[in-house]
Image: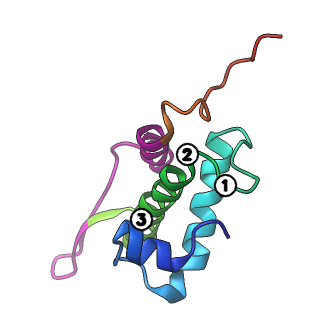
Amino acid sequence: MKVDYSFYADTYGGNRISQDDWQRISQKAEQRLDSYTFGRCSGDWEGESWCNRAKCAVCEMSEILYADEKRNGKTSENTDGYSVSYDTGKSLSGTLYDVAQVYLGDTGLLYAGVDSC
């Protein structure tokens, strides 16, 4: 695990995800970030110039994943008259990619092109 709970709570300042849920949720965020960077984040991050930025991206992405998991796509629910509204806006994947773009957009990690020879 590249981002531990102490980084989330102490450095990032997060408090929305419990320590019990952190490993499961952050692992999903790390896998998404690795996918968005075409495997460039699969190794050890320590010592990299972008390390703390990637960790902060994982923290923010984890909070988004956790919130989405808790609401199950619902934006509102009324049990009195049984009315449920669902989010039809931006996709979860698009939102998570936007977070990665904010933190890592100028690092080259999200570059999808081919390096010249």
Residue highlighted by disc 2? 50
Whether 90 is among the magenta residues is: yes
Relative vertical location of residue 75 with respect to residue 23 in this rendering, above or below: above
The magenta region covers 76-103
Whether 89 is among the magenta residues is: yes
Q: Is residue 85 left or right of residue 51?
A: left
Of 83 and 33, nearer the camera is 33
Query: Which quarter of the image is occupied by the N terminus?
Result: bottom right
From this viewpoint, which residue is outermost toward the left? 80
Q: Please tell me whether mark 3 sits on a helix, a strand or a loop.
A: helix
- What mark, if any, has residue 66 been given in the picture? none
> Distance from label 3 to label 2 (Cα)?
27 Å
Residue highlighted by disc 3? 68
Tag in front: 3 or 2: 2
Quarter of the image where one finds residue 29: bottom right
Q: Please tell me whether mark 2 sits on a helix, a strand or a loop.
A: loop
Q: Position of residue 26 (x, y in %)?
A: 56, 68
For the point 44% across and 43% down, the residue is 103
Q: Please tell me whether mark 1 sits on a helix, a strand or a loop.
A: loop
From this viewpoint, which residue is outermost toward the right? 117
Q: Are marks 2 and 1 in contact (CB under 8 Å)?
A: yes
> Distance from label 2 to label 1 (Cα)?
8 Å
Bin the neighbour count of mark 1 within 10 Å (Cα to Cα): few under 14, some 14-19, many 20 and up. some
For the point 39% across and 62% down, the residue is 73
Residue highlighted by disc 1? 45
Query: What amino acid type is highlighted by mark number 1?
Result: Trp
Of 102 and 84, nearer the camera is 102
Query: What amino acid type is highlighted by mark number 2?
Result: Trp
Q: Is residue 76 left or right of residue 115?
A: left
Q: Are marks 1 and 3 in contact (CB under 8 Å)?
A: no
